[in-house]
Image: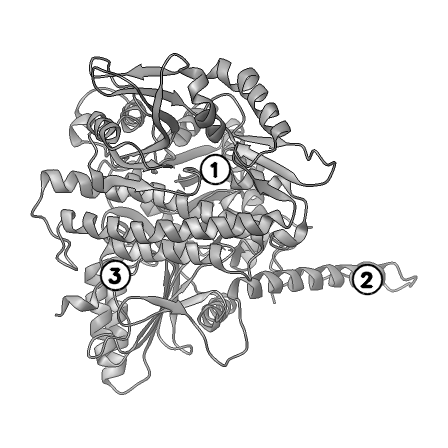
């Protein structure tokens, strides 16, 4: 099979981040939101270097001949292609940032350099530096005989070449610390102009005052990105330490791993740069020069400086679900009918209400849940602790290996354990990425289940930023499967044959293949056949080969894939019946939907699993079937709206590139459509309540009986 139908995973991800950068360049988007997208682009790239480039760097050293199974590229070839692409993207980001900041000047916000400041402002900044910054910095002088200081991951440093007769001598000043990074300057003319300078720029300018006994040859700002690809080694499990202590040790080690990128703000003296690279053990191809600030995380603070609504997205907040009555307990409503919550268009509050009710419900005996990422001030944790303190059996699987959330989860696991919850960490070799809650109630002698299966984390903050789905169900068969999974986790084994749920690693990929085969059979019989897939990433080669087979058999396949897509759509003779759409917009597309079959006979699942090998066979993941006809119709319609998006959607071309989807159909921004729809339904619900309330105040002898609200 031709390799040209596949794309490299890392290069495909860079294409996704390029689409993020396009948002920063899109003049239809408010200025401060465009600024935010430049920061997201950079933050994404930071993590990419820490994880993916770090992994490839290790592979290049340990397994230099190992090749990617899709494009047959070695780690060295992949790194070379990555650096070439990043060197294309960084100047695009520089231009986008420059244009945004120039436009912000028209709205009273200006970033200045020391040279562009007025004489009065320069005097103010010099006094500020001497008073607020200089006492807090810790400069060092480094030469051949002096140990080089440890440069922290993603921290900014001022590096100076100092005159020396005995070889290279560097001055190093940490440019981050206890002082504010954004230094604002009052408008000397009494106007509303808000001018600011970044602390590192001020430190760089006044560095000669720090090393006043030396002649400065050259100076620059630098930022090091370190490898974060550290995993739990099997041997670590063999000693007596608690796994939580092992993870704490791993987090400490990660901070000291090898640099994989060096960013500079200025061209630097070549001898001094070579000396710096030698000390950091970093190669020239890992060096990147930026014309923007080395760290754009201050973008949010710039947004806080401006109170002009037109520079930001119109305010939208998650709405109350039309499927839920606020005047009733949530558990009886779930028992009457399944409920689907769609974040961020609908609020996560009903889920939190469910946990709080379960914590107090005398009929609830057990609460079991898997936790991957949580908010800093987590209401979910508080509800689980309340339940344990109320005498419920609370079983919590806390995934301590959730990358970059390890320390947060370690702390939460202690809090839960102190409250009386039973804590486990999952199988040794598999992350638990499922989003699963099971509540067990005793109704007389009868045991009954309430389950929740979601596509996204139990995180109140991200539920307002990411698109995710959450199914609340009292289907007892689904509850039994969930109970079987938790029992398997308790006994450190894997679930093999669930009846209804799809559960990775043993019972998700193969059922998906079987359902694709069913569609192939329909197509071969001359019947309409259809597959719809919404995931964040696609790179499982086994599934891709099966999708190619389905396409060749005549099955129509539509895929909405936000990020990595290693399969090229529309390639003649292979993927002609496949379309790939990527939507990058105001919210992060995060939900996973699997559709197998035409509208009349479709099977629909929502899932925590992307179509990546790490999800399908290396993690514990859960996909839930949708049995409620109303919810099935809703999900089908949602998927259709996503495919109709011609504002924020890009379509993938046969060569693997992405272009904005342009057609003569009415304009559709799917995310705006869904949030507007949520507002309309919420307003309609309020109006209906007001109508009932008003009708109840009419003077009449006839008794008014209010029926329980039903789902529309």
Left or right of 59, for residue 662: right
Question: Is 92 in front, or is 325?
Answer: 92
Q: Earlier in the sequence, mark 2 or mark 3?
A: 3
Numbered badge on residue 566: 3
Query: Mark 3: few, some, or many residues within 10 Å (few <14, many ≥20)?
Result: many
Q: Is residue 493 visible?
A: no
Mark 2: which secondary structure? Answer: loop
Q: Quadrant of residue 497?
A: bottom left
Quadrant holding the N terminus = bottom left
Question: Is 238 in front, or is 487?
Answer: 238
Q: Could you give the CA–CA distance between mark 2 and mark 3, rounded to whole angstroms?
A: 61 Å
Question: Is 658 in front, or is 685?
Answer: 658
Query: Mark 2: few, some, or many residues within 10 Å (few <14, many ≥20)?
Result: few
Q: Could you give the CA–CA distance between mark 1 and mark 3, rounded to whole angstroms?
A: 46 Å
User: At 44% from the left edge and 34% from the top edge, which residue is drawn?
Assistant: 394
Query: Mark 1: few, some, or many residues within 10 Å (few <14, many ≥20)?
Result: some
Left or right of 142, for residue 591: right
The residue at which mark 2 appears reads as 704
Left or right of 20, for residue 359: right
Numbered badge on residue 604: none
User: At 38% from the left edge and 12% from the top edge, which residue is drawn?
Assistant: 213
Compared with residue 708, is residue 259 higher up or lower down, i.e. above or below? Answer: above
User: At 28% from the left edge and 53% from the top edge, which residue is drawn?
Assistant: 85
Mark 1: which secondary structure? Answer: strand
Q: How many marks?
A: 3
Q: Residue furthest bottom?
A: 526
Q: Could you give the CA–CA distance between mark 1 and mark 2, rounded to whole angstroms?
A: 38 Å
Question: Is 350 in front, or is 174?
Answer: 174
Compared with residue 463, is residue 58 higher up or lower down, i.e. above or below? Answer: above
Marks 2 and 3: which is nearer the front? 3
Numbered badge on residue 365: 1
């Amino acid at each position: 099979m031709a390799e040209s139908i596949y794309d490299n995973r890392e290069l495909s991800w860079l294409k996704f981040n390029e689409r993020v950068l396009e948002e920063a360049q899109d003049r239809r988007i408010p200025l401060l939101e465009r600024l935010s997208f430049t920061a997201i682009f950079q933050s994404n790239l930071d993590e990419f270097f820490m994880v993916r480039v770090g992994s490839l760097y290790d592979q290049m050293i340990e397994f230099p001949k190992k090749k990617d199974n899709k494009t047959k590229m070695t780690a060295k070839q992949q790194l070379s292609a990555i650096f070439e692409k990043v060197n294309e993207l960084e100047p695009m980001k520089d231009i986008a940032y420059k244009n945004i900041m120039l436009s912000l000047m028209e709205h009273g916000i200006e970033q200045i350099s020391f040279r562009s400041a007025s004489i009065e402002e320069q005097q103010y900044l010099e006094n500020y530096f001497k008073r607020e910054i200089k006492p807090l910095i810790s400069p060092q002088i480094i030469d051949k005989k002096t140990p080089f200081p440890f440069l922290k991951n993603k921290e900014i440093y001022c590096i100076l070449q100092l005159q020396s007769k005995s070889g290279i001598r560097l001055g190093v000043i940490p440019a981050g610390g206890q002082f504010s990074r954004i230094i604002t300057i009052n408008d000397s003319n009494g106007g509303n102009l808000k001018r600011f300078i970044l602390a590192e720029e001020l430190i760089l300018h006044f560095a000669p005052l720090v090393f006043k006994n030396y002649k400065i040859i050259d100076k620059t700002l630098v930022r090091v990105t370190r490898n974060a690809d550290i995993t739990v080694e099997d041997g670590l499990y063999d000693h007596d330490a608690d796994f939580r202590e092992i993870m704490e040790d791993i987090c400490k080690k990660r901070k000291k791993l090898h640099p994989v990128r060096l960013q500079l703000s200025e061209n630097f003296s070549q001898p001094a740069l070579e000396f710096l690279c030698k000390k950091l053990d970093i190669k020239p191809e890992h060096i990147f020069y930026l014309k923007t600030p080395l760290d754009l995380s201050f973008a949010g603070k710039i947004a806080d400086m401006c109170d002009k609504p037109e520079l930001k997205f119109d305010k939208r907040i998650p709405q109350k679900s039309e499927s839920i009555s606020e005047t009733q307990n949530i558990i009886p409503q779930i028992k009457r009918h399944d409920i689907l919550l769609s974040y961020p268009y609908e609020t996560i509050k009903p889920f939190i209400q469910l946990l709080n009710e379960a914590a107090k419900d005398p009929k609830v005996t057990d609460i079991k849940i898997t936790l991957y990422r949580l908010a800093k001030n987590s209401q979910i944790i508080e509800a689980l602790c309340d339940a344990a303190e109320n005498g419920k059996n609370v079983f919590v699987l806390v995934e301590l290996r959730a990358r970059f959330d390890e320390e947060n989860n370690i702390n939460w696991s202690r809090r839960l354990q102190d409250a009386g919850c039973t804590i486990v960490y999952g199988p040794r070799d598999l992350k638990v990425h499922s989003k699963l809650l099971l509540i067990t109630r005793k109704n007389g002698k009868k045991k009954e289940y309430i389950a929740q299966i979601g596509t996204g984390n139990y995180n109140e903050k991200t539920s307002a930023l990411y698109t995710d789905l959450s199914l609340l169900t009292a289907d007892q068969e689904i509850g039994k499967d969930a109970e079987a999974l938790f029992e398997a986790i308790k006994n450190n084994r894997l679930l093999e044959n669930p009846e209804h749920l799809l559960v990775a690693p043993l019972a998700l990929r193969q059922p998906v293949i079987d359902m694709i085969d069913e569609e192939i059979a329909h197509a071969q019989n001359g019947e309409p056949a259809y597959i719809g897939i919404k995931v964040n990433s696609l790179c499982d080669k086994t599934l891709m080969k099966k999708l190619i087979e389905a396409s060749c058999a005549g099955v129509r396949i539509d895929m909405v894939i936000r990020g990595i897509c290693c399969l090229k759509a529309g390639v003649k003779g292979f993927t002609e019946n496949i379309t790939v759409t990527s939507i990058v917009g105001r919210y992060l597309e995060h939900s996973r939907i699997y559709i197998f079959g035409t509208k009349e006979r479709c099977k629909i699942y929502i899932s925590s699993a992307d179509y990546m090998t790490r999800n399908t066979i290396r993690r514990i993941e859960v996909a839930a079937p949708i049995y409620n006809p109303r919810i099935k119709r809703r999900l089908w319609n949602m998927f259709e709206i996503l495919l109709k998006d011609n504002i924020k959607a890009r379509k993938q071309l046969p060569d693997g590139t992405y272009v904005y989807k342009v057609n003569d159909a009415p304009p559709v921004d799917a995310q705006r459509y869904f949030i507007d729809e949520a507002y309309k339904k919420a307003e309609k619900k309020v109006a209906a309540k007001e109508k009932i309330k008003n009708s109840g105040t009419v003077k009449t002898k006839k008794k008014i009986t209010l029926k329980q609200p039903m789902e529309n």
